[in-house]
């Protein structure tokens, strides 16, 4: 089995673990802390997110591209190991240096503002550890090099310790600070842990001022995307809290967490795909470049569309089981947000996997700016009427604008007719699956938990059955690779 396929399987397992662990703690935490404390945590988290985006800028995306380009350049030169290592050391050091400076600047500004406006809140101060943790996040280096085991080991270890700490120490509403400390401080320890692998691999850091300068402009252009995304994600939540109160932010935040869980599956393939796309583009293999893009879009349609419609169909039972009756107002919010998942997946492909690799950084930035302005303006107009549902609709609108603009700039690779042709069959399959799921409560009238389990089983079974009947190429591609793996083991 090729290294690319192994990495994809590892990333899928890693992302599956990332999905399962929040589902283990969320039902417990929301019941112990309650809507008010959950809302307080969501409000503080929204505030710190506005600083985190300035810490990472566009570094994760840009760093993966540069490191992948270095590997692609020296990969065909087996006798240039020392030069390869030196180039990696210099490029990593210059990119991380910008990240490190940004981290200190944002940490100082964050603590200053917290002292001025939230000095009575321990929770806000504890979130400062998250800024430091993001400042030392170098997972982008290992993802670019396909060294996923190191990240998986770190994450699994830290998640297990975090979950154990939450169950043992968080017992009442007054333990909110313990919950925040466990998440933020242990995240920081995980980032420190991965540095040992980097130092051993590169032998240290090489940060030079002249090397920093050559990356600053490109990073700042790409930074427009996360900064603008902050507007229609974090700032919209802050506006929601200011207009409707912290409880509404809590509702929105819980729905958004479920949305991000679905997004992890897209990022699993994207993390493995980008280095290969960079290689094909840099070596001029445009046909293979286009083939991988088409495959990735079909993968998005085959996997994300049924997730979107499936979650919308089970939303009532899902919220009742995992969040409890107190969070039932989350149901319409999660339905709106989960529909944004498909647009977010398309944006990841169009922007991160195509436009960044092709150097269309300015066009990529324009899409983010225009989409964010549209989202922010729409949120101001509708939040007073629809509260958290209005903020969710503003998020959906922002994603729609971004994808529309990006589609215009990559129309030479993926046209609208081609996209509709690839998407339509999976949309019909997903609608058929949704109908099967919605029929379950009319046949079975048990508890919410068993209803949810049966709905998930019926949904998955019906969708896979449809793919088999239609002899879908994505499904048969996965089966063929699984058979190859089995044969190799034997």
Image: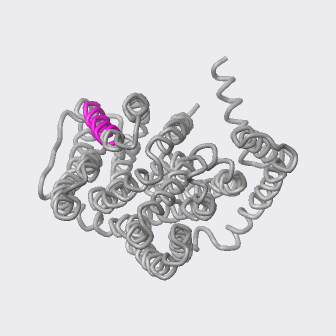
Residue 71 in sight here:
yes
Closer to the camera, 35 or 88? 35
Residue 478 lies in the magenta stretch:
no
Residue at screen point 35% across, 70% down: 224
Q: Residue at x 80, y 43 (%)?
A: 458
Residue 149: x and y in percent read 43, 31
Which percent across, then down, holds residue 209? 12, 57
Total tally of numbered discs in the picture: 0
Q: Is residue 423 above or below residue 460?
A: below
In the picture, the quarter occupied by the C terminus is: top right
Residue 30 image position (x, y, % from top left): 49, 45
Residue drawn at (47%, 52%) of the image = 35
Left or right, 193 with reference to 237: left
Quarter holding the N terminus is top right
Q: The magenta stretch spans which residues?
A: 182-197
Look at the image and say whether residue 186 sits in the magenta stretch. Answer: yes
Drawn side of residue 424 relative to residue 243, left or right:
right
Front residue (pair 374, 393): 393
- Residue 344, compared with residue 437, is above or below; it is below
């Amino acid at each position: 089995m090729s290294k690319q396929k192994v990495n994809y399987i590892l990333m899928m397992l890693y992302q599956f673990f990332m999905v399962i662990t929040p589902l283990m703690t969320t039902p417990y935490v929301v019941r112990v802390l309650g809507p008010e404390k959950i809302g307080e945590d969501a409000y503080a988290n929204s505030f710190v997110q506005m600083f985190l985006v300035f810490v990472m800028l566009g570094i994760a995306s840009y760093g993966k591209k540069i490191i992948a380009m270095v590997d692609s350049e020296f990969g065909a030169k087996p006798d240039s190991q020392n030069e390869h290592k030196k180039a990696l050391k210099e490029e990593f050091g210059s990119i991380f240096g910008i990240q490190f400076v940004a981290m200190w600047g944002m940490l100082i500004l964050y603590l200053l503002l917290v002292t001025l406006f939230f000095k009575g809140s321990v929770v806000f101060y504890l979130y400062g550890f998250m800024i430091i943790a993001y400042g030392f996040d170098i997972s982008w280096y290992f993802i670019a090099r396909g060294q996923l085991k190191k990240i998986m080991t770190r994450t699994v270890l830290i998640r297990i310790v975090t979950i154990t700490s939450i169950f043992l120490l968080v017992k009442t509403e007054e333990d909110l600070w313990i919950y925040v400390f466990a998440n933020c401080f242990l995240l920081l320890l995980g980032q420190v842990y991965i540095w040992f692998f980097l130092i051993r691999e590169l032998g240290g850091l090489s940060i030079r001022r002249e090397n920093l300068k050559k990356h600053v402009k490109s990073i700042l252009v790409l930074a427009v995307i996360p900064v603008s995304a902050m507007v229609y994600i974090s700032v919209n939540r802050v506006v929601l809290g200011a207009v409707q109160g912290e409880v509404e932010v809590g509702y929105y935040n819980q729905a958004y967490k479920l949305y991000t869980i679905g997004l992890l599956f897209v990022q699993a393939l994207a993390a493995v795909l980008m280095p290969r796309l960079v290689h094909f583009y840099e070596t001029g293999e445009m046909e293979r470049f286009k083939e991988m893009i088409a495959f990735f879009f079909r993968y998005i349609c085959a996997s994300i569309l049924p997730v979107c419609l499936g979650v919308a169909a089970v939303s009532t039972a899902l919220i009742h089981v995992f969040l409890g009756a107190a969070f039932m107002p989350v149901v319409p919010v999660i339905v709106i947000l989960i529909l944004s998942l498909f647009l977010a997946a398309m944006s990841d492909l169009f922007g991160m996997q195509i436009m960044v690799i092709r150097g269309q950084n300015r066009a990529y930035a324009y899409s983010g700016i225009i989409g964010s302005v549209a989202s922010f303006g729409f949120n101001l107009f509708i939040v007073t009427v629809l509260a958290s549902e209005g903020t969710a609709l503003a998020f959906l609108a922002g994603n729609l604008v971004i994808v529309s603009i990006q589609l215009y700039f990559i129309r030479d690779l993926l046209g609208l007719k081609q996209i509709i042709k690839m998407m339509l069959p999976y949309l019909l399959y997903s609608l058929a699956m949704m109908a099967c799921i919605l029929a379950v409560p009319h046949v079975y009238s048990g508890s919410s938990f068993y209803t949810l389990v049966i709905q998930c089983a019926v949904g998955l079974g019906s969708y896979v059955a449809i793919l088999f009947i239609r002899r879908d190429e994505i499904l048969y591609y996965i089966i063929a690779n699984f058979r190859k793996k089995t044969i190799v083991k034997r």
